[in-house]
């Protein structure tokens, strides 16, 4: 159940014990789960078109911030977790591109592989993979979870 702002889900709709204490916020008498999702960490095949293409857009924005030393959204938690992990971000982009093409769409925005340095694997999460699946299940979309 999404409450007002799309950035919060009611705790009663989430699996208890999955989320860290720092991810809960209070609104009135209800505990709410804050969603800070931009780049999903789950298999792109599990994303509907809306989330697949939305993530692709966000990934390009984060790539631009990191590779061009831009200031906008530099301090956003989702951007910060990719600092020093351009290679991992590049790999995620390639996974998205593969799925975009599998669905019959064209892709014309490649990333510069020469700028993909740092860690190859993302090991830092704003929300755990389990939390991300719960978040997606509660969105009004066609994600095939």
Image (tube, rainbow, N blue to C red):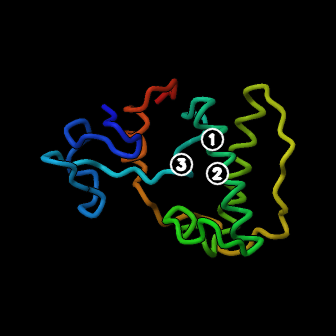
* Residue located 49% across and 26% down the image: 141
Quarter assignment of residue 12: top left
Q: What x and y, as percent, mark residue 66?
A: 69, 70
Q: Secondary structure at mark 1?
A: helix
* Residue located 85% across and 62% down the image: 112
Q: Secondary structure at mark 3?
A: loop
**Dot in front, 2 or 3:** 2
Q: Determine crowd level at label 1: few under 14, some 14-19, many 20+ residues with C-alpha closer than 10 A.
A: few
Mark 2 to mark 3 CA distance (whole Å): 10 Å
Q: What x and y, as percent, mark residue 49?
A: 63, 30
Mark 2 to mark 1 CA distance (whole Å): 6 Å
Q: Is residue 86 above or below residue 91?
A: below
6 lies left or right of 50: left
Q: Earlier in the sequence, mark 3 or mark 1?
A: 3
Q: Secondary structure at mark 2?
A: helix
28 lies left or right of 38: left
Q: Which mark is residue 136?
A: none
* Residue located 46% across and 30% down the image: 145
36 lies left or right of 38: left
Residue, disc 1: 54
Q: What x and y, as percent, mark residue 106?
A: 84, 33
**Dot in front, 3 or 1:** 1
Q: What x and y, as percent, mark residue 138?
A: 37, 32
Residue, disc 3: 40
Q: Determine crowd level at label 2: few under 14, some 14-19, many 20+ residues with C-alpha closer than 10 A.
A: some
Mark 3 to mark 1 CA distance (whole Å): 10 Å
Are the two marked residues, 3 and 1, in contact with CB atoms closer than 8 angstroms?
A: no
Residue, disc 2: 58
- Pick the residue in front: 136 or 42: 136
Q: Is residue 130 above or below residue 103?
A: below
Q: Earlier in the sequence, mark 2 or mark 3?
A: 3
């Amino acid at each position: 159940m999404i409450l007002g702002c799309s950035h919060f889900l009611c705790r009663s709709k989430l699996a208890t014990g999955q989320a860290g204490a720092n991810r809960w916020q209070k609104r009135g008498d209800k505990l709410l789960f804050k969603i800070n999702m931009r780049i999903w960490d789950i298999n792109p095949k599990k994303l509907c078109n809306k989330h697949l293409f939305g993530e692709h857009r966000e990934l390009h924005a984060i790539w631009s911030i990191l590779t061009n030393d831009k200031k906008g959204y530099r301090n956003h938690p989702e951007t910060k977790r990719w600092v020093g992990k351009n290679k991992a971000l590049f790999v995620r982009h390639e996974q998205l591109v593969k799925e975009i093409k599998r669905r019959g769409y064209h892709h014309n925005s490649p990333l510069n592989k020469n700028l993909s340095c740092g860690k190859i694997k993302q090991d830092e999460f704003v929300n755990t993979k389990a939390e991300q699946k719960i978040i997606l299940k509660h969105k009004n979309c066609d994600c095939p979870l």
